[in-house]
Amino acid sequence: MLVRITNMRGVDLRLFDFDYDLTWAAFFMNAQGGIYGRYGGRNEGEAEAHLSLAGLKYAMQRALEAHRRHPRRPAELVPLPSHEPDRPEQFRAAQRLKQGDCIHCHQVYDFRREAFEGDWRKERVWVYPPPENLGLIMEVDQGDLVEQVVPGSPAAEAGLQSQDRLLWVKPDEGAEPMSIASYADLQYALHRTPADAQHMLLAWQRDGRELQGKLPLKEGWRKSDISWRGSMWGIAPRASVWGPDLSAEQKATLGLAPSRLAFRQGDYVPPQAAAAGVRAGDIVVGINGLELEMTMLQFNAYIRLNYEVGDTVTLNVIRDGKRLDVPMKLQAHD
Amino acid sequence: MKRRSSVCLIGAMLGVAAVWWHPGARGGAEEAAWISSYEEGQQIARRTGKALFVVFRCER
């Protein structure tokens, strides 16, 4: 059966637990709700970097094999915090939408953030850690095959090598093993691993033998670049400045290195920035005198992760070839 | 690392998924067609014993 869902209304979030910032995600499952596998997933790189027809086919074949072996695998519902409803339309934030309006996937994160009612902490942005954080580079066309292990990484410490085939991951010792057939399977297993876990258990196949190891998890292992996430834009405080990044050539004419932050404020200047004195066409090159190496999107994520509502910052801009400092009080809304 | 980056990739994937998921679609046209209701898919899957391929596609 082929089911395509484009509206999150009515979707059981305990069953369909996935990275809601993705533009698409796939589940292989049975009529009981038992999930055999997933496909999709991404990191801060290109949206489709981990997708391929061959990779999808491989994950599908593995799922169909599992279905033949366990056609009545039961559903495993993910427990939700007591303040969270299990349907998106039941969140209070969703009540502001017009009846029948489409609920987009990424809005689930926005709804959940609002449901915390002030108790939301920024650590909650670290969802779906990419395997690359642990030194694991996976083959695109066969999502359980290790393409490369970064020397000195946690994956290397666990004993993994290139061309090993991952079999399963246990988020903690008491957990059921989560079988791996795709990048999405692996990313979900990492997501389910507690942030404060000291290690995770893995099994892999090498030369026909099954091996197991403990992969150490170090401080900050879940952190990644969130600038690609649609849900990032709802996090306070707002930077209130955005626009196209300058090209390397344009930066060079201003004496800036190719990797330096430099973007041109668009024609619309949000009220917060306009009140501070930002004008359309200003080139934003830093904050508080910091020489940042990032893109405009990363700058917007940086502000959200490193400052609080009410903080006063100094935007460093270039206007008509001259450098200016623009003090601005950060707000929850633009 | 092999890359298959293309704006058409997801569309192509969904296009061929039906063939791979139900080769021959012996259970009839309803197996090979995309439907938009998970509950309806569940009912048909129960009746046919087939597995479900469920895709969430955000069309914002």
Image (cartoon, rainbow, N blue to C red):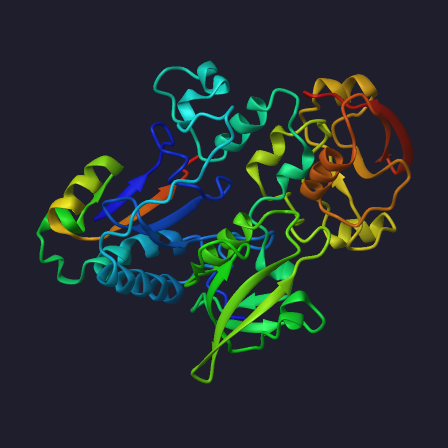
Residue sitting at x 36%, y 15%: A99
Regarding residue A243, the answer to whether it shows in the image is no
Q: What is the quadrant of residue A258 in the picture?
A: bottom right
Give A317 or B39, whichever is nearer the viewer: B39
- Relative horizontal placement of residue A7, taking residue B3 as reference (left or right): left
Residue sitting at x 15%, y 52%: B49
Give B36 or A196, whichever is nearer the viewer: A196
- Relative horizontal placement of residue A241, taking residue A124 as reference (left or right): right
Regarding residue A135, the answer to whether it shows in the image is yes
Q: Position of residue A28 (x, y in %)?
A: 32, 53
Residue closest to the far front: A174
Give A35 or A1, whichever is nearer the viewer: A35
**A309 over B25 or under it: above or below:** above
Give A209 or A261, whichever is nearer the viewer: A209
Q: Position of residue A62 (x, y in %)?
A: 32, 65
Q: Position of residue B20 (x, y in %)?
A: 24, 61
Residue sitting at x 82%, y 46%: A292
- Relative horizontal placement of residue A169, taking residue B25 as reference (left or right): right
